Each structure stands twice: as structure tokens, then as C-alpha cells.
Amino acid sequence: MAQINVTGLTFGYEGSFDNVFENVSFMVDTNWKLGFIGRNGKGKTTFLNLLMGKYEYQGSISSNVYFDYFPYEVSENELEKTADELMEKWKSGVESWRVMCELPKLSVDAELLYRPFKTLSYGERTKIMLAVLFSGDNDFLLIDEPTNHLDMEARDIAKAYLSEKKGFILVSHDRDLLDACTDHVLVLNRATIEVQSGNFSSWWENKEKQDAFARSENEKHLKEIGKLKAAADRTARWAEKSENSKIGFDPIKENDRSISTRSFIGAKTKKMQSRVKSFEDRMNREIEEKEGLLQDIEETIDLKIMPLKHHKERLIECRDLSLRYLDGNENVIENLTFEVRQGERVFLTGANGSGKSSLIKAILAKNMGPSNSVVSDGVVGRIDVNTNALGENIGNMELFGELHVAAGLKISYINQDTSHLKGSLSDHARRNDLDYSLLLSILRQLDMNREQFAKNMEDFSEGQKKKVLIASSLLTPAHLYIWDEPLNYIDVFSRMQIERLIEKYAPTMLLVEHDVRFREKLSSKEICL
């Protein structure tokens, strides 16, 4: 058991307006299962890179352990290699037999180690990297968002695997994963950093209590400051009036006064002025105690959405639908029947490769007739729909059975891929016919810093890119919102913010999302592929 001591850490990127970390100090134990929590852009991945020695910084980070980082980097050229060939580069001195001992715990066949890496699914790649990661000694492991793009089954396997391990920092926005796998949390608050025993739920419960207490104390101090200010102003006016009456008087009207009264009035004025000073001192103490009370409160602004009302109750209908790609031999989807009605939030679930995104693409393509439209960046593009004797060809997909999309349906679509986001936010707004100022306003509500607005979107973090897509979709009036894995890389606070939005406005939605808490809270229907 060892400790990692961070003392006076200060770091900022070159050309940045503010430092990411400013004179922060804390300690963590290398035996902990540490969950790392914070807003997008607060510096979680940056801190992991600082531990790995990638950047120069002020202050000190001291420890006698070796750090290893997930995910390992794989270049385009290395995709042709096997994991067995790559693992020595990933983790120097790793032994294959130790990796093979870890693979069964992740439900992975050792045969996958000898396939070209590019042929493996995201889930298979993640599991193999985790097996390599945990195949060393005396390492403190830095695990950065391991469950993005994983289906529910793969997430459950990774969750069970990590819950049996220790000695790591886990960066994740998945509340279910953090609860299952961590016994301490490291939290990047708005102004401070804290380390606390427990998992996400215990920390969140404590935070809500602390925030409620801070608000109550702040309100109490504000009331006391108001009372003191009113008393000070009143006493100051009395003192000024008394002081002005000290010199000069009308002996006829003020026959009870004499020249000797002047000293009495002066003493009375001095006493009043002393009381004013006492009020001001107490006010300053109250203000000083008030300062910092609200510095770490996460104030999330309620978002808005503008769903349209369609004249039909049933927006999408599938009857015995089968789908396959023209270059494939097997159906991706087989005999699927379901419908989406207005006001429903339908979640598509199933393993990676079960056809969730393919079904969404088929619905989008089917919708792109002359009277229908798909809006928002990331759309699959206009595809001609040709009918033949066998069924319907939609782009490179062939459909059998029935797929009906209501006429005149407007769909707002979020693609799980963000690679198409390039250029400035103003360019993005112009391409998608969005109000630029409203787009920036929603991004601010999603806690994106104004400094980001001057950058090109390719320089954004993945979480910030996702927020651009979400903000664009919220600005788009539509009958149906189709979101394909919208929450990948999105921080916990923004997830809760989006949950409240959907609960309040109840838009009609078709979603693919693996966040268990999000789905349990919002789902009105689940379709398992």
C-alpha cells in the first residue's frame, strides 16, 4: 500500500485563459478503487496525463508506483496487427499467460488475441485492453471511460470485472458503474477538489445535503447583512443629523440649549458613529463567512425543447421487418414488429451488432421523401428508395416486411459519431439553419466555457462535441427525436439535466442508450433486438 501525494499542483495549457489546476493539494491511496467525477472540460483526462508524465507542471506529484493508462493507443497502421503483437508495446514486460488468465473473467476467448485488431468489435477491444492492463504488478491503473460504445452485456461484464479489482482511478460518467466499482471518489468541484470515502450515490447524497446547508447559510447571512446595513444606515443618518446640530442654535426656539450642550452632542455623535463602525465590522464578518458558500454548488439550468404535434398518433410502424446489407449473407434484423406513438420514449436495446443503428438508418432513409425531412448534423444523407419484387433497397440495405413512417414527419437526429463536426460553431449553425446566439446559450446552459466558442469543433473534447449535437437537436422543432448513444462522454450533471428536460416536455423519442439509470428513469417502452 502506497500513497500518491499531490502538492501545490498548478497546470494550464499554453494559450489558455485559465489554469486547469491552481495550487491544488490532495492525497489518494493506491489500494483504493477511486472514481473520478467532474464536469466535461474540468481536467480529468488532463490529470491522468499529468500522472503519466506527459506535461510539465508546477508543484509536485509524488508516488513510488508505476502508472498505466487505458485505453492504449492503436494507430491506423497497427490495426492490421494482432493484440498478441501489440500488447508488449502497450505494457512493457507483460506476459501472455497472465493476459490469458484474465480473459475468461471478461468472457473473452483467447483466440481473439491472434485476430487482426481491426476485425474486433469495440467491446472485444475494450475487454482485451483491460485484460492487458490488469496483467502487471505494483501498477496503479488509470482507466478513462471504459464503457463508451459498449452494449449492456459488455458493460455488465466490465462492471463485474472491475468490481473485483482495486488500485485504480476510474473516470466514468456512468452512475451504475461508479456505484458498483468504487469505494472512494475524487471530485473536481467548480472551485475545489475533494476526496471522499464511498461510491457515487453516497457522495451525491452528501453533496445534496452540503448544497442545501450552504444555500440555507447563504440565505441566513444575506438576511443578517440586510438587517445590519439598514441599522447602520439609520444610525449613520442620526449621527450626521446630531453632528450638524452641534454648532449654532436659536436661543429663542431652543431655550433648553446653551453653549455647554455642544460637548454633550459631540459625545452622543461619537457614540453613534462608533455603533455604525460596529455594524460595519459585523457586516464584513458576515460577508466574509458568506464568501465561498456557493462556490461548489452545481447549478444546472433547466433546458427547453420544442416538440411538434403530428396529426397522426402512430409515427413509426414495423411489421415482420427483416433487414440485411446487400454485401452480407445474413439478416441483421429478423421479423421485428413494433410501433412508436406520440409521447412515447422507445429505447432500442441489444448487443453491439444487433442492428440498432441499422434500424435507425433505415427509418431515416425511409423518411426522406419529398414531404418528410431529417434535420440536425450527422444525418445519413439523402438516399433513393427503390422498390423491387423482393422488397425495398434503401441505400446499401435491403428490407423485407413493412416499415411505415408517417407522412410529413420531421425528425431531429443525433448520430453516435462526432467525426463530422469540423469548423467553427457559427459554421455549424449556418449549415443546420440554427440560431447561433441560441446555440451558444444552450451550450452555456450545458456548462461549456465561453473560451471554447472561439475554437474549431475538431479541437473540442468528445463530451463537448456531444453537447454540440444535443444543443443542435434541442433547437430543432421536430415530431420525433432519434438519439443514437447521445450520452457517451457526457458528464453526470448534464445527464441529470437532460433527464429533467425529457421528463418535463415528454417529446416523442427513439433512443439507443446504455446508461442504465437514464433508461430506467425515462423509458416508456423497450425494444430488444
Image (cartoon, rainbow, N blue to C red):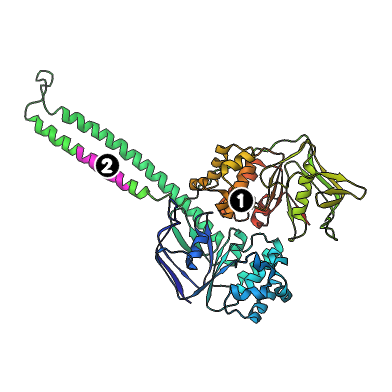
Q: In the rendered view, does 24 fall on the left or right side of 505? A: left
Q: Name the residue under label 2.
A: 279
Is 280 covered by the magenta stretch? Answer: yes
Q: Which amino acid does label 1 sit on?
A: Lys
Q: Is residue 390 left or right of residue 16?
A: right
Residues at circles 2 and 1 in contact by the CB criterion of under 8 Å:
no
Q: Which of 356 and 518 is in front in this view?
A: 356
Q: What's the residue at 53%, 57% (across, down)? A: 204
For residue 381, what is the image quadrant? top right
- Circle 2: residue type: Phe
Distance CA(mark 2)–CA(mark 1): 51 Å
The earlier-in-sequence mark between 2 and 1 is 2
Magenta segment = 273-285
Q: Where is residue 170 in the image (x, y as percent from the top left)?
A: 56, 65
Q: Which residue is drawn at 59% across and 47% down?
A: 468
Q: Residue at x 41, y 46 (%)?
A: 218
